[in-house]
Amino acid sequence: MSESSTLSLNNEVVMPALGFGVFQTPPDETRAAVSAALAAGYRLIDTAAAYGNERQVGEAIAASGLERSDVFVETKIWISDYGYDRTLHGFEKSARKLGLDQLDLLILHQALPSDFDKTLEAYRALETLLADGKVRAIGVSNFMVDHLRSLLDHANVVPAVNQIEVHPYFSQPGLQTTNAEHGILTQAWSPIGGITFYRDGQHTSTLQDPVIGEIAQAHGKSPAQVMLRWHLQQGRSAIPKSTNPQRIGENFDVFDFDLSTDELARIDALDTGRRGGPEPEAITLASFGRDIPED
Ligand code: A2P
């Protein structure tokens, strides 16, 4: 194995590189999925206020019997809770649902490009939470290069993480470089390309890609495992989602093989430059705002 399975954030906090995601996992399936992930060995769980399943994530962690310090818990503040006081309260809501006093990583879910002052106020609240020891690290998600520059012009704390869409069909090399230049760790959402992805009007999937399939066959591994290996060997954190216990285990079984430099380059070359998820520049409160419940 060519690299550690943990990553040091820019404030020295140590985070597992490979985590478990619960985006679009229905609340009534979340507890079982997170329990299966913890049993399989995952120690990083990524959720979000907007996913509506923080309570069930917290229940699974509590039921696992693991020490609190052995599980790294990450969640996200939704745009409707931006603004200094609202974001402080957003933390309280998430912490209460998760059943935790302290969160390991709290990030802003999106930039609000048309109301960037509100985004800055939200980030200032994260800085306060960090200074008060309520969170161990802070960061952002879906921030593009211009959003990062505007944030860094005002912030006191450089984000530890920028969680962005990265999979072989949309790998954002320029944004990854900008993250790295500032000491911001790139964390990949939809790391195996599970996001519905269209190319030339056709739904297409990285899981069926012939290049990835060929590399997988050469290593006796699955396409998902090859993609996760690609992230880990390039120094990213990745948070694959699954509700299927067999696939949850498969996605964690990626520490016994190495891709060659040539194989990594062949996967890099699959980038289409077209995202599967929403355009970060187009996120507005009018189109994406929604109330995050108290409980
Ligand atoms: P399921 O929950 O039924 O396993 P991503 O995190 O990249 O967005 O991918 C998540 C999607 O990929 C989900 O639809 C998930 O479905 C599916 N998935 C997760 N792991 C695997 C795997 N190892 N092989 C194939 N599909 C997978």
Image (tube, rainbow, N blue to C red):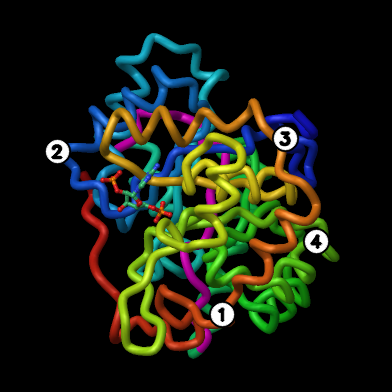
| Res 16 quadrant in image | top right
- The quadrant of the picture occupied by the N terminus is top right
SS class of the residue under badge 1?
loop
Q: Residue at x 34, y 18 (%)?
A: 62
**Residue displayed at 43% across by 32% down:** 250
Whether tag 4 and tag 2 are in contact, CB under 8 A, the answer is no
Q: Quadrant of residue 98?
A: top left
Q: Nearer the viewer, mark 1 or mark 2?
A: 1
**Mark 3 and mark 1: Cα distance apart in space:** 34 Å
Question: Is label 1 or label 4 in front?
Answer: 1
Q: Earlier in the sequence, mark 1 or mark 4?
A: 4
| Residue behind mark 4 | 180
Please give the label number shown on residue 202.
none
Q: Amino acid at mark 2?
A: Asp
Tell me: is circle 4 under 8 Å from ligand 1.
no
Q: Which residue is mark 2?
A: 28
Is residue 112 in the magenta section?
yes
As drawn, 15 above or below 109: above
Kindly identify the amino acid type of the residue bearing the numbered disc 1: Thr
- Cα–Cα span, label 4 and label 3: 17 Å
Please tell me whether residue 170 belongs to the stretch shown in magenta: no
- The residue range painted magenta reads 97-113
Q: Amino acid at mark 3?
A: Val
Residue located 37% across and 33% down the image: 248
